[in-house]
Amino acid sequence: MAALASRTLLSKAAQQGVRSAGFHSTAAAARKVCVVGGGGGIGQPLSLLLKMDPNVSHVSVFDMVGAPGVAADLGHIDTPATASGHGMSLKQFTGDEAIPKEEQSAFQAKEFDAALQGCDVVVIPAGVPRKPGMTRQDLFEVNATLNANFADAVAKNCPDAMVAIISNPVNSTVPIFAEQMKKNGCYDPKKIFGVTTLDIVRAHTFVAEAAGVDVTSLKIPVVGGHAGASILPLLSQATPSVKDKLTDEQVEALTVRIQNGGTEVVMAKAGAGSATLSMAKAGAQFAISLIKAQNGEKGIVECAYVESDVVPECQWFATQVEIGPNGIEKNLGLGELDTFEKQKLSEAITELVPSITEGVEFVANMAEKKVA
Ligand code: NAD
Ligand code: LMR
């Protein structure tokens, strides 16, 4: 039996075009995860954390340039998962051995196909990060097209995969990805997630510090979206409760800090990008939850930005969702909000609605352009 499972894993790895040596686990189903943008600031540590996780059997790293090197590096780590790199190496991109410019996009497309084939989970930290003075929405112009193209590639190669989108502005890129999947005739609202886990990670860190509680035991839902006022931490629902440990002023200040956590890092990095390490932790946590759910583990609950009817004004809204083998099984909604949170909810809606509309209209207009 064990030998059979091992053979199955090996043959799946072979189909996946595994290029680095590795060990093979016989414990769980073979789970292939692709990190799109895996050579970047988030992509590299995220790929590392996935390579370290026993639930992952293969990490496929795709990027414009450099993924083969990242995969070679990962491949030396003594954990059961294998790794493969797809996309141009630096040598293929530039210099004497470079692939001719006019052939590069066909080469990349083929590499992307290989990276995605057979994937169970696709995580997307590709795209431009912001610099001081920019909002996430300022990234729309570049990252919108990227995410529409990623949807085409996922639709072609692994339409049943669960997809976790990190690329900003999440409030728009996730609707864009979904609309493009619809155009490809394979949209499943249970399987497309905007990753807002970093907001929860920040809420845990900042609130634990202020309330003097153990950060490892704290659970705080953060709902809404992933930009400024759209980020709504529900401190009244913290478990264990922190109500008696924080004044109203502290709750307000913590809410503002969680909403501006991304900007705090952007300012501290002073032009060298945005959160990468904390995002890698958050992204790996989310992706591993998806794999655990696919493997039939019960009680997998994460906050995520999903298509929803919880807030009638917002087609997309982050809430806690229970995830099963085929995606979202139950949206756990908002729960009970206190007066302060109700007021913040209306601010979140005001921030979210135009970003959702911008994403949906972007794909609709792309379609019009194609027809014209
Ligand atoms: P980065 O520039 O360090 O890395 C991005 C990577 O994407 C690069 O390696 C780049 O080559 C790659 N890339 C670009 N176009 C690509 C394409 N067409 N195909 C494949 N790869 C491509 O940036 P980063 O710091 O890793 O941030 C990436 C994105 O994640 C940004 O949009 C950032 O705003 C966002 N982000 C989101 C959250 C969140 O909570 N959701 C947190 C942090 C950052
Ligand atoms: C974050 O919250 O850290 C990310 O969305 C990156 C950013 O631009 O703030």
Image (tube, rainbow, N blue to C red):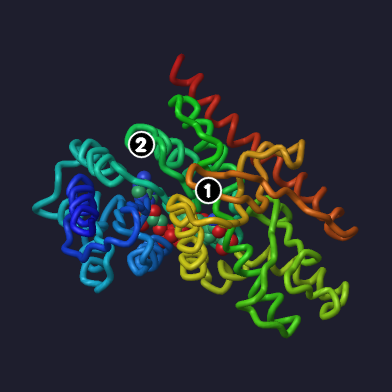
Callout 2: helix, strand or loop? helix
Return the x and y of residue 149 as percentages of the image width and height: 40, 36
Q: Are marks 1 and 2 in contact (CB under 8 Å)?
A: no
Name the disc covering residue 153, or none: 2
The answer to which image quadrant residue 195 occupies is bottom right
User: Is 6 placed left or right of 319 in the picture?
Assistant: left
How many other residues sit within 10 Å of disc 1, few (<14), some (14-19) or many (≥20)? many
Q: Is residue 145 above or below residue 212?
A: above
Please indicate, yes or no, whether residue 52 appears anywhere in the rendered image: yes
Q: Amino acid at mark 1?
A: Gly
Residue 355 spot, x, y in % from top left:
65, 41
Q: In this rendering, is residue 110 above or below 130? A: above
Quadrant showing the N terminus: bottom left
Q: Is residue 248 above or below residue 161?
A: below
For residue 324, the mark is 1
Q: Residue at x 23, y 62 (%)?
A: 24
Q: Which of the pair 236/130 is nearer the observer?
A: 236
Q: Whole-Å distance between the Cαs marked 1 and 2? A: 24 Å
Packing grade of label 2 (10 A; few <14, some 14-19, many >=20) is some
Q: Which mark is residue 297?
A: none
Measured as percent of width and height from the top left, residue 129 is found at 49, 57
